[in-house]
Amino acid sequence: MKNRNQVFDNVLDLVGNTPLVKLNKIASKFKGNFYAKVESFNPGHSSKDRIALYIIEEAEKKGILSPGDTIIETTSGNTGFSIAMVSIIKGYDCVLAVSSKSSPDKIDMLKTMGAKVYVCPAHVSADDPRSYYEVAKRLHSEIKGSVYINQYFNQLNIDAHYKSTGPEIWEQTEGKITHLLACSGTGGTISGTAKYLKEQNPDIQVIGVDAFGSVIKKYHETREFDEKEIYPYRIEGLGKNLIPTATDFDVIDEFVKVTDEDSAHTARLIAKTEGMFVGYTSGAVTQALLQLGEEGRFKKGDNVVVIFPDHGARYMSKVYSDKWMNEQGFFDSVNEAAAQNIQY
Ligand code: PMP
C-alpha cells in the first residue's frame, strides 16, 4: 500500500485506502463511537472506483481484455464515471448506454472522461430493443472483445469490496468494529464488506439501508419479490425495483428504510456539523444511524461504521439546492430554507 507522501504512477494507484473519519457531532447524543468511511477520497470521488478497477483487472487477468478493447455499462452515475476513468488510463474504449432521464451535466461529465455515450429513451420497457439494457446487450454481442460490467448481476462487484473495503475497515478499527451500516443499491458494497468482516467476527451487526419505494428490505425479510413495494422515489443509488444478484442477503442482518426528505436534510446536516460535503446516500446512511440511535440500539463502547459512498459536488442541483428542496416540498417555504441554513 502506498502512502500519500510518494509519487503515484497514475490516478488508479489512488483507488481504495480511503480514510475512516470520526463523526464527532451528528450522533453525539447516542452512546458509542461513530465513524465514516469516506469514499469520495477515491480519485473518481466514489466507491465505484473500486469495482471498476477490480472488474477490469480481473478481465485482464483472464485474458478477456487487451488494450483497444471496449468496456460497456448501463449507467450515467458513479460507476460510469469510474469505468471511464479506468478506461482512459488503461487504453480501453468506454461505451455507456444511459437513460434519456440522465441530466445533461452527467452526460457531459462522462464525455469529458472520454466515454462514448448512447442516450436511450427512458420510457420504454426494459426488454424494448431501444432500452439502455438492450442497447448495452446488443453492443456487447456486436463488439468483439468487449466486456459488459453489468454491476447489478456481477459477483465480482461483491469480491471487489470483499478484497478491499472490508479489510481496510477491519484494519482501521483494529478489529473493534461492532456495527456496519451501508446503503444497498447493487448491494456490492455492503455484501462484500460484510462478508469479510463477518469472517473476522460473526458478531458484527450488518445493517443495510433501503429506500421507501424499493423491494430490497421486503425481499430480505420474506425472500419474495413484492411488486406492491415499488413506487417512485428520489434518492439515486439506493434501493431497486429488482433483486440484484450482487446482493448477498445472507450476510446482512437487517434493513432500515429512510425517506427522501429525511435523507436530504441529514446530508445537509453532515456538512453543517462535520464539515463533510457528501452525497445524498451519505445522508441516507446517516439518517438510518440516527433512527437506530433513537431506538437505543447503540451502547457505550460500540464502534459503528457508516459508508459515505460519494461526494456532494454531484448533487449541487438537487439536495444542495434550496430551490430543488423547496420544489420537492422538503421546505415549507423558501424562507424556511433560509432559516434552515442559520439553524444548524
Ligand atoms: N450510493 C451511491 C451514490 C451509489 O451510486 C451507489 C451505487 N449504486 C450506492 C450508494 C450503493 O452501493 P452499492 O451499489 O455497492 O450497493
Image: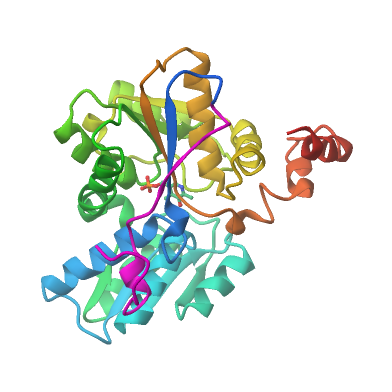
Q: Is residue 293 above or below residue 8?
A: above
Q: Where is residue 68 drawn, in percent x and y?
A: 28, 87
Image quarter of residue 122: bottom right
**Going by the picture, which residue comes out furthest to the top?**
296
Q: Which residues are magenta?
A: 1-27
> Quick check: 56 above or below 311?
below
Q: Position of residue 274 (x, y in %)?
A: 59, 41
For the N terminus, the image quarter is bottom left
Query: Where is residue 127 drawn, in percent x and y?
Result: 38, 56
Residue in the picture at 48% in, 77% down:
113
The correct choice, above or below, for 320 with respect to 114 in the image is above
Whether residue 264 appears in this view of the structure is yes
State left or right for residue 331 relative to residue 93. Answer: right
Residue 260's spot in the image, x, y percent? 60, 35
Q: Residue at x 39, y 26 (%)?
A: 255
Left or right: 289 in relation to 263? left
Decide whether the magenta segment is chiefly helix, strand or loop.
loop
Location of residue 91 by image quarter: bottom left
Name the residue: 10% across, 71% down.
Answer: 62
Residue projecting furthest to the right:
335
In magenta stretch: residue 103: no
Scheme of image coloration:
rainbow
Residue 13 belongs to the span the image colors magenta? yes
Q: Quadrant of residue 327?
A: top right
The answer to whether residue 222 is above or below residue 172 is: above
Question: Does 40 sit left or right of 144 as displayed?
Answer: right
> With 240 as the anchor, is 72 left or right in this view?
left
What is the total number of numbered labels drawn onto the structure image?
0
